[in-house]
Image (cartoon, rainbow, N blue to C red):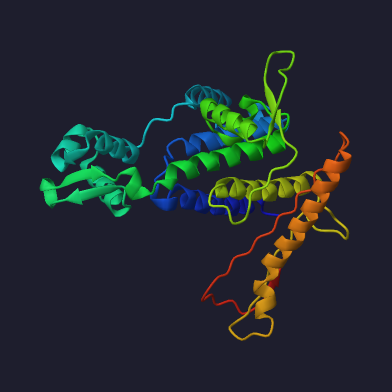
Amino acid sequence: MDFAALINAIVRQTTVLIAQLATTAGIRAPLAHVANQVFLDLVRELEGQGLGRKVVADMFGIALRSYQRKVQRLAESQTDRSKTLWSATLTFITDEGVVARRRVLDRFCRDDEEVLRAVLRDLVDSGLVYRTGRGDGSVYRAATAEEIGQATAGDAAASTEAFVHMAVYHLAPASVQTICDETRLEPAVVLRALQDLVADGRIEALPPDAEGVAHWRCATCLLPADGAAGWEAALFHHYQSVVVAICNKLQGGRSRSVPQEVIGGSTWEYLIWSGHPFEDQVLALLQETRARASALRQAVTAHNERHGRPDDATRVIFYTGQTVHLGDDHTEEGES
């Protein structure tokens, strides 16, 4: 099998997802650290699987000494999250209140002027900044919280809580450090979310261990499908579930499915059109599957709450999803 081609294809699809997330809702998320973080995470996973540094360095095509210097340099600076020009410009305009274009250009005179002008256009186009006037006579003002939407801050806090809640559920007993490692959130943000989750009764704080480290746990974590906040945690959970299932399949040394297998996934494609006799059944498939899976989860949760669960309980993860491509030239159905 051409594993290099498979890896390249997966990386390509992952970059598509990252690009979509980085531009969601008009936000331009900083990406300067992504390549370095991918390298460090990949190094940690490869070495965690028992590979020596010489072998890992060879896999990256670099000398051992260069590899060691790169790991050390990136590890020392991985917490450096300096602002992008986009973020710094928005912050400057917000702090100034009303500011002329010439003032913005002077403030960021060390940056490429063409790039800075493109950033200003993007901020205006995204609705985060308002512009009055034309050319160098333009004046900028940052949109207020009311103009952007008063619910933004609340949704952000709720989304963070959902993200942390999901991490506690999977890592329990979870510490602030393990949650930060899992979510890449800052410790102060995680701790604040944990306090709110405990106050709401969604998670439970455990006594500190022998080293004085606090831990948290929870028995359930429900993210409603129609919830306005928490979609980030749901997306991450779905993506993580797919990755874990694939990795478990690969670690088992299996490249094909066998009857009665409980690890893996399947994909079906249906070619339908308006008026197709199976159109309604195909489009309702996800809704029906969700309803059945939700009913089963509720029954299992109720049983566990009544009778408790043993320490060796098995966690089974079932994931499902669908999308519709309009106007494609597909001529055949598919299954994999």
Residue 268 at x, y percent in the picture: 70, 68
Side of 7 where 72 appears, left or right: left
The residue that appears at 48% across and 49% down in the rendered structure is 21
Residue 150 at x, y percent in the picture: 40, 46
Residue 38, placed above or below residue 271 = above
Residue 238 at x, y percent in the picture: 65, 50
Residue 310 at x, y percent in the picture: 88, 36
Based on the displayed image, in which of its 4 quarters is residue 200 positioned? top right
Q: Of 111 and 240, which appears nearest the observer?
A: 240
Q: Quadrant of the N terminus?
A: bottom right
The residue that appears at 68% across and 74% down in the rendered structure is 282
Residue 22, placed above or below residue 34 = below
Q: Of 57 and 156, which appears nearest the observer?
A: 156
Q: Quadrant of the C terminus?
A: bottom right
Based on the displayed image, in which of its 4 quarters is residue 216 positioned? top right
The residue that appears at 25% across and 38% down in the rendered structure is 93
Residue 75, placed above or below residue 10 = above
The residue that appears at 51% across and 76% down in the rendered structure is 327
Q: Of 304 and 267, which appears nearest the observer?
A: 304
Q: Of 8 and 273, which appears nearest the observer?
A: 273
Number of callouts in the render? 0
Extreme residue in the top direction = 211
Based on the displayed image, in which of its 4 quarters is residue 160 positioned? top right
Q: Can the viewer see residue 253 in this picture?
A: no
Q: Can the viewer see residue 125 in this picture?
A: yes
